[in-house]
Amino acid sequence: MTDSLLRRAQHTLAPAQRRDLASLTALTEADPVAHVVARMHLDTAAASGIVPGGLWVVRRRVGLGREVVGLVWAGANLTVTLAPEADPDAADDLSADLAAAMVGRLSRPAAIVGEAALTLDLWGRVEPWWGPAREVREHQVSMVIEGEPARRALAGSDALALEGVRQATLEDYDLLLPACVHMFIGEVGYDPMRHGRAAYEERLRYLIRAGRAYLQMGVVDGRRQVVFKAEVGALGGGVAQLQGVWVHPSARGRGHAQAGLARVVDAIHSHTAPTVSLYVNDFNRSAISAYRAVGFREVGAFSTVMF
């Protein structure tokens, strides 16, 4: 797949420039929850005037000009936002050209994440070059909460000597890191401390410094430990996407996720964003039930292809 072949396509993929930011931002506004990751990077670029290298623009040839019809964020994970197409043939041409350009111009990411239908369609097209996948999670429930969360009183929580839910500080780092690693291994399937440790630790420090990491301390198994935690992994366009929601294994089944999330949602609504979102594997019925009990509602579906 050569650059000359890509140039003959109806659609092209090129590094984004500052003049593209307004058009790309408008694309994300059609569904701010689904496109919060892309919007986060666009907001950062607009504020700093520096367009990150991972931001790419999809253009369609129209006569002698070109129009912006999509964007690709190609960081550790890859996510795609495309303008809706009323014509199925036009939509197919756009996806086909984009998949060819992705294979020709981008390195395979750690994962492809995004709206289910689009992510799975693109994965089907790039799989011969980027496959095999380590795992494909075809249906992950996208949920949001905009109003007041439901609160739950915890029976028998005195035994854990629970402290309040709060933003983490760098002084909490040594206690928060093992909880984050435990969550990551259970969710993603490998130990980030063995593969990409420096980047993983720096991201956690960044989230703490940005006030986007929340935790609740308590006494578990005779030691002061993290009982509950969650991070705002993506923030843009008035949407805060929660990631890494976790409860200590010895404290599960007692409602700590519901109680902790309610307080995190309150804090985010007060200081960060009016809409809080998350996505969860469809087979994790207990987590979905907990999120619904807090007041989250389903708004769509994501898919994740992991390599």
Image: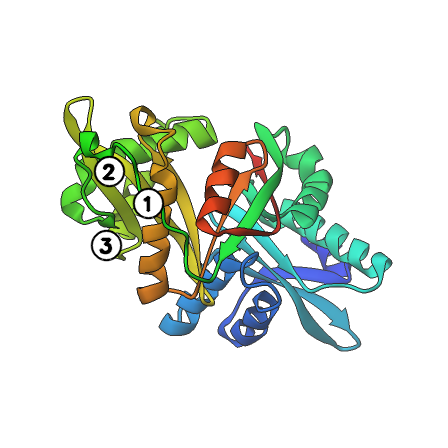
Q: In the depicted view, which residue is nearer to us: 211 or 260?
A: 260
Residue 260, label in figure: 1
Residue placed under numbered mark 3 in the picture: 209
Q: Earlier in the sequence, mark 1 or mark 2?
A: 2
Amino acid, disc 2: Leu
Residue depicted at 29% across the width and 35% down the height? 155
Q: Quadrant of residue 3?
A: bottom right
Where residue 103 sits: x, y (%)?
Answer: 65, 44
Q: Quadrant of the N terminus?
A: top right
Given residues 57 and 27, the one toward you in this image is: 27
- Answer above or below: position of 277 versus 184: below
- In primary-sequence order, the first of circles 3 and 1 is 3
Q: Nearer the viewer, mark 3 or mark 2?
A: 2
Residue at screen point 68% across, 49% down: 118
Q: Label 1 is placed on what type of residue? A: Gly
- Say which mark, if any, is on residue 176: 2
